[in-house]
């Protein structure tokens, strides 16, 4: 049987460069909110019974506001998650006996063998 790697709880909360973010990850929220802003401009025009694409300056403004809001909320979310991970990392460092190092198990070790009963 192979020796299973050991899991350290602190390593779960640190990114040592082994996780690569996707191409869309940094631009997804601003792009989605900009698209939502464009949609809001179309909806406002539809609500006032105007042609949907009339007043292009409104579409540009709502798209820019939506993109800026998406970028702002994305940064706030990243700051919140970084703070949360730092607090959890600090707690684990202060209380190492509450988080013992565990040996990683594979599904084959955990699950019982399946025997069909017919």
Image (cartoon, helix red, strand yellow):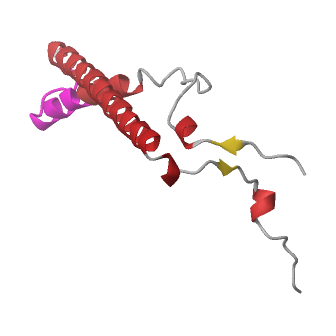
| 35 to the left or right of 25 | left
Give the residue displayed 12% in from the left and 34% down from the top.
Answer: 49
Task: State which quadrant residue 9 falls in.
Answer: top right
Front-most of residues 59 and 51: 59
Q: Is residue 37 magenta?
A: no
Q: Provide residue 79's location: percent of width, then percent of height.
A: 32, 28
Is 108 placed above or below 113 here? above
Give the residue displayed 58% in from the left and 51% down from the top.
Answer: 100
Front-most of residues 23 and 98: 98
Q: Quadrant of the C terminus?
A: bottom right
Is 6 placed above or below 26 here? below
Task: State which quadrant residue 90 falls in.
Answer: top left
Is 77 placed above or below 2 here? above
Give the residue displayed 83% in from the left and 46% down from the top.
Answer: 3
Front-most of residues 97 and 102: 97
| 13 to the left or right of 17 | left
- Tally of marks: 0
Q: Provide residue 94's location: percent of width, then percent of height.
A: 42, 42
Q: Is residue 47 magenta?
A: yes
Q: Provide residue 104's location: percent of width, then percent of height.
A: 71, 49
Give the residue displayed 54% in from the left and 24% down from the top.
Answer: 21
Front-most of residues 37 and 57: 37
| 41 to the left or right of 103 | left
| 52 to the left or right of 106 | left
Bounds of the magenta segment: 39-54
Residue furthest to the bottom in view is 118
């Amino acid at each position: 049987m192979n020796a299973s790697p050991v899991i350290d709880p602190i390593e779960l909360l640190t990114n040592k460069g082994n996780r690569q973010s996707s191409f869309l990850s940094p631009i997804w929220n601003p792009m989605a909110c900009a698209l939502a802003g464009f949609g809001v401009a179309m909806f406002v025009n539809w609500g006032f019974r105007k042609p949907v694409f009339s007043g292009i300056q409104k579409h540009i403004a709502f798209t820019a506001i939506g993109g800026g809001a998406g970028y702002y909320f994305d940064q706030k979310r990243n700051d919140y998650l970084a703070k949360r991970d730092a607090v959890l990392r600090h707690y684990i460092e202060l209380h190492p006996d509450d988080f013992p190092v565990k040996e990683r198990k594979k599904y084959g070790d955990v699950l019982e063998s399946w025997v069909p009963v017919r």
